Image (cartoon, coloured by chain):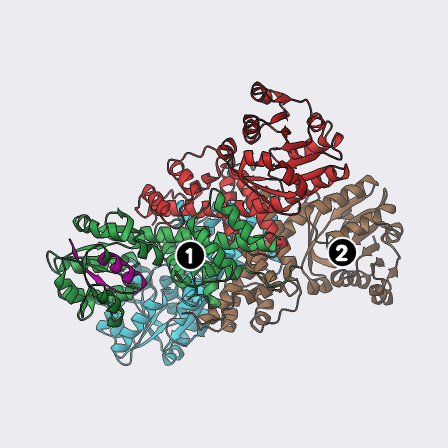
Chain colours: A green, B red, C cyan, D brown
Amino acid sequence: MQEVGFLGMGIMGKAMAMNLLRHGFKVHVWNRTLSKCIELKEHGAFVEETPAAVIKKCKVTIGMLSDPAAALSVVFDKGGILEEVCHGKGYIDMSTVDAETSIKIGEAVNDKGGVFLEAPVSGSKKPAEDGQLIILAAGEKALYDGVLPAFDVLGKKSFYLGEVGNGAKMKLVVNMIMGSMMNAFSEGLVLADKSGLSPTTLLEVLDLGAIANPMFRMKGPSMVSSDFNPAFPLKHQQKDMRLALALGDENAVSMPVAAAANESFKKARSIGLGDLDFSAVYEIFKVTEPSP
Amino acid sequence: MQEVGFLGMGIMGKAMAMNLLRHGFKVHVWNRTLSKCIELKEHGAFVEETPAAVIKKCKVTIGMLSDPAAALSVVFDKGGILEEVCHGKGYIDMSTVDAETSIKIGEAVNDKGGVFLEAPVSGSKKPAEDGQLIILAAGEKALYDGVLPAFDVLGKKSFYLGEVGNGAKMKLVVNMIMGSMMNAFSEGLVLADKSGLSPTTLLEVLDLGAIANPMFRMKGPSMVSSDFNPAFPLKHQQKDMRLALALGDENAVSMPVAAAANESFKKARSIGLGDLDFSAVYEIFKVTEPSP
Amino acid sequence: MQEVGFLGMGIMGKAMAMNLLRHGFKVHVWNRTLSKCIELKEHGAFVEETPAAVIKKCKVTIGMLSDPAAALSVVFDKGGILEEVCHGKGYIDMSTVDAETSIKIGEAVNDKGGVFLEAPVSGSKKPAEDGQLIILAAGEKALYDGVLPAFDVLGKKSFYLGEVGNGAKMKLVVNMIMGSMMNAFSEGLVLADKSGLSPTTLLEVLDLGAIANPMFRMKGPSMVSSDFNPAFPLKHQQKDMRLALALGDENAVSMPVAAAANESFKKARSIGLGDLDFSAVYEIFKVTEPSP
Amino acid sequence: MQEVGFLGMGIMGKAMAMNLLRHGFKVHVWNRTLSKCIELKEHGAFVEETPAAVIKKCKVTIGMLSDPAAALSVVFDKGGILEEVCHGKGYIDMSTVDAETSIKIGEAVNDKGGVFLEAPVSGSKKPAEDGQLIILAAGEKALYDGVLPAFDVLGKKSFYLGEVGNGAKMKLVVNMIMGSMMNAFSEGLVLADKSGLSPTTLLEVLDLGAIANPMFRMKGPSMVSSDFNPAFPLKHQQKDMRLALALGDENAVSMPVAAAANESFKKARSIGLGDLDFSAVYEIFKVTEPSP
């Protein structure tokens, strides 16, 4: 497979398509706003007018859309995937959507004779640019095997997780842990500060110990300086917490820390921080009055 | 400084004293149960009968006791540090105690003309053996500077944090974040399992991403196989959560995730898991009935 | 209006229909399992074969079904309300369902020319028998005004809350507060017990003070004696907590206490208490090991 | 017993002493600021210069001080109770203090030959004025029996709870439940408001149902109109939550709802609401931004 379709030229999709081009893939791209395809075209991509046109040209097409609505739209709307998908064609949705959306898309593609893989990724802009994503694939195993050369370019590791829906679930679990950790981290930074300790020294101490991790290292300094430029918007993190809690509800798993973290993210949303980076939850712990 | 006293031959203290011996320090040791000093003696340590005897022989003495009661006992009881500490002598308490205990010990040592440093560590048995502790020192700066050759042997990095109490506080903040993370991790592992995902695959996915950290890597596999051999007992972790929350209370810092994590550790204590490793909190999230 | 239809002869529906009969209403009843209508028939009710048959006979029909699925079924399935509802007929759904279900039913009834009212109630078996329910109505105001004679028999007070969905929402808010209170109460009872105080004395003290309420008075003694005979099953209470939290999520309202209570109800479900009374959440706080 | 000493003429103490006067008791009063005794004197009280002078004149003396420090001061400071308490004299501390403070005072009084009762009350200004307090007594049973005529005037009911410390603990348990309920109530009021329901209607609905209680009835309307005139200051409520959680910690009782409520009270303190009524926790749930 050296020819691949790519739907969705947002921050993530564009970086991923560019990686494929750089590694010698022929890439047919489409985006709702076609102007976002210009840079790709300059690097050799073929620009198509509709998702259906991409599917027609390519045996395998990847989608990287912003949300479930967009992910459904490229499949079911006029000019969408269903118009051209058929036996011998595969569609891989790498968007972050809930399991239900994935399952719905998968069934529609299968009904037309095509094969489907959901493959959400862990990692944001920088790992996308560097081909360092973690790919959580589930669905048609043969399609997974076939698309591995592309996955090898896009990510540092891919997992095959079984039936459609499992990719979405795995991503939710990871993001839930991440969201709780971000809260623990924020609480600790504020506690250090209010207790007369330097948050910056705390960052140094943390980075040497058993809980040192890239997120603390990357986000810590910008949080301390109140820089919340969104890599992963808080409202999306909160949505993932909600969906993970819903998954826990289905399975009777009690998760009090995740629930508390979710409420803090909601608190952050309630004061208008939803479009900032998810690390902006830090702001809600700040003490504005001297303690009595 | 090539001669140093060492009080307390528990798991941590013994490993640390051994490291000092290996690096050419002359070490005078004491332990409540003297038999625990035998191995050290075989490696060249001088065994003393009381803490006071150690202080008398050494300009600088380190204490590594199991809890605040023991830390106070070596100072204030008969045969204790106060009987011999005087101008020109320094005592460094590396035990994990609360700020009040540190301050009380520091004042008593100062009253006798001695100098004091609290220096709790981050890291347990393995880092102690490998000289890879993180040392959080606070108190007399000159004593800190003087003891750096020993700290260089014991730890991979030491911090000087200002006035006595700050070392204890910094350690609490770090342990609070760690305790919340352990809860987030446990919730995630159980959620994965109950949602039909492999906990082992989750560990792999986590280890590749932005929240990869040594604790998840070390504890994850043993948690999945229900091995909770205590490196850091759950009841001690819970005590640190409680003390960190109390520190937050003093400073009006709201920490809902830490509070939820603390209650889960208490739940674990309530069903008899207090003496197991703190990762045993994982057990309380397990679902014992099929969801309706 | 002295003639009324009544769909659903569960615990609640039967008690309500009986009340209407006792107060001189002519009542046409239907139930999926017709045998449940026998007692009503003996008291003068007319038994019909389908929901449609009830609608055909009555200008106003009340439904009291067990869950959203049943509530939808009597409307949309074969022999359902939609087959006969038309201009001049009103349907009042008193089941506890989510806002979406109410809205869907309301729209379908309206499309056929009928008028609709949702009217969930607060109160369980005993208030239903005694005509002491609290009725939370929303939808067609004229239908509300017309059905007031029946509401006066069924409840001690009815509220008109505006557009369809508001009845469901009001009930969720009330049940959310109730669920959090039950958790606070349970935690307090266990705390008293483990602190060497008599839970029974606590019940007496509570009943004299500012937070005395019927629920503590009714449930307290049976909780202390571990009697959890279900008046309101725990799994239904937990579902209401979940739906209330979802409503909070939509509106960016952070509710940490409700979230913590929800996780405790989930914990109770996870150990198989879902079918007991919601007061069985008490069981999860019990301490099974002596504290260290 | 028709002669009684009374220490502490704060809001509560003054109302209680006035009640005793009104019911024919001879009352000897003392207050740190003597001017606060003037009104009592006009109603027939004898004003003394020190706590010791009160003890000297009366066989039984009641204390109602603002906090543990004041409660200890009237006992241990110069001119304090210990100077005159002796065999045949009894001291009853009705202040709200922790169990340790009660125990310390009790032991000191016993050492001088006197008898001691702790008797904290449930109820604030209004019940104090109306003689409708709930009295939670513990300690010397004979003293309890002897003081019952006074308790009958001060309260609507008194309980004898056993050993000193149990009164304090019982009050903590009650206040903990109350604090969690206030949070549940606040969350519900905000949720109603943001969901398009009238908070005032919610108050009406609540007042008719199973969880109707005097606190909701009294506080609800003022909360809705943002009136937080302090009857029970938020910082004191939060302190009681903290102490109740500490009691739970000692006994390994996990209390996630109380812990979440405590963090919300701390959040309220952190933004400067500590001196307002505890119902001001309502303010922290308000949403200041439209949800996305």
State yes or no: discs 2 and 1 in contact (Cβ < 8 Å).
no
Dividing the picture into quadrants, the one containing residue C250 is: bottom left
Q: Residue at x 69, y 65 (%)?
A: D126
Tell me where residue B159 appears, x and y as whole percent: 58, 44
Q: Quadrant of the C terminus of chain D?
A: bottom left
Q: Residue at x 83, y 54 (%)?
A: D4
Residue D55 in the magenta stretch? The answer is no
The chain identifier of the residue carrying mark 1 reads C
The chain identifier of the residue carrying mark 2 reads D
Residue matched to label 1: C237
Can residue C33 be seen in this snapshot? no
Indicate whether C181 appears above or below B81: below
Q: Residue at x 39, y 61 (%)?
A: A231
Can residue B60 be seen in this snapshot? yes
Question: For the residue labelled by badge 2, is the local secondary structure a helix, a strand or a loop?
Answer: loop
Dividing the picture into quadrants, the one containing residue C152 is: bottom left
Q: Nearer the viewer, residue B256 or A17?
A: A17
Q: Nearer the viewer, residue A246 or B99?
A: B99
Question: For the residue labelled by badge 1, is the local secondary structure a helix, a strand or a loop?
Answer: helix
Residue matched to label 2: D65
